[in-house]
Image: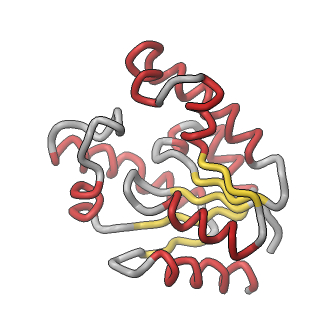
Amino acid sequence: MKGPLAIIGYMGSGKSTVGRILARRLGWEFVDLDTEIAVREKRPIPQIFRESGEGYFRDLESRGLAWALGTEERVVACGGGVVLREENRRLLSAASTVFLEEDLGVLYARTRGDSRPLRGTSREEFERRYAEREALYAESCGLRVLVDGRTPEEVTEEVLRWMKG
């Protein structure tokens, strides 16, 4: 299977961690889409949300995704909300895309803190946002991987087997 390879999933699912390992194993470039956006904007994601709004961020995300998926030998860790726009889902469906799925309780525990602007304050809000996105993740991927307590290396091995398939 040829690249690029996109990693999608909800916040805290391990996209960046698994993406870095995959890129190293494949000898490909690694791009964390949120980091790329923050570097280009010269401000962190929470500040972009606060000062310019979610719509502005999503515009940056769509442009960044099109750029990131424009190179064959690249692993792209996408932000959790990348699937919200149809244009992004089309781009992801045309790439080799992996959905990392994890237990909601695990995700909720992993994502505490101010660095995640859409994490929400309540468990209910967190779960509602995930429920809105789960079907979009599933329709955008070629492989769905249940993380379920497995190590990033074990998840990476499953993705590599799929890519060779």
Q: Residue 133 versus residue 55: which sits nearer the camera?
A: 55
Residue at image location 42% in from the left, 22% down from the top: 47
Q: How many marks?
A: 0
Q: Residue 160 versus residue 30: which sits nearer the camera?
A: 30
- Asked if residue 2 lies left or right of residue 23, the reply is right
Residue at image location 33% in from the left, 50% down from the top: 130
- The quadrant in which the N terminus is found is bottom right
**Rendered view: 50 above or below 19:** above
- Asked if residue 148 lies left or right of residue 14, the reply is left
Whole-percent x, y for residue 145 in the image: 49, 74
- Asked if residue 20 lies left or right of residue 95, the reply is left
Residue at image location 59% in from the left, 72% down from the top: 143
Which of the 4 quarters of the picture holds residue 38? top right
Whole-percent x, y for residue 115 in the image: 35, 38
- Asked if residue 146 lies left or right of residue 114, the reply is right
Residue at image location 16% in from the left, 45% down from the top: 124
Which color scheme did the rendering employ for the protein? Answer: secondary structure
**Rendered view: 122 above or below 25:** above
Q: Residue 83 versus residue 31: which sits nearer the camera?
A: 31
Whole-percent x, y for residue 159 in the image: 61, 77
**Rendered view: 134 above or below 143:** above
- The quadrant in which the C terminus is found is bottom right
Whole-percent x, y for residue 151 in the image: 42, 79
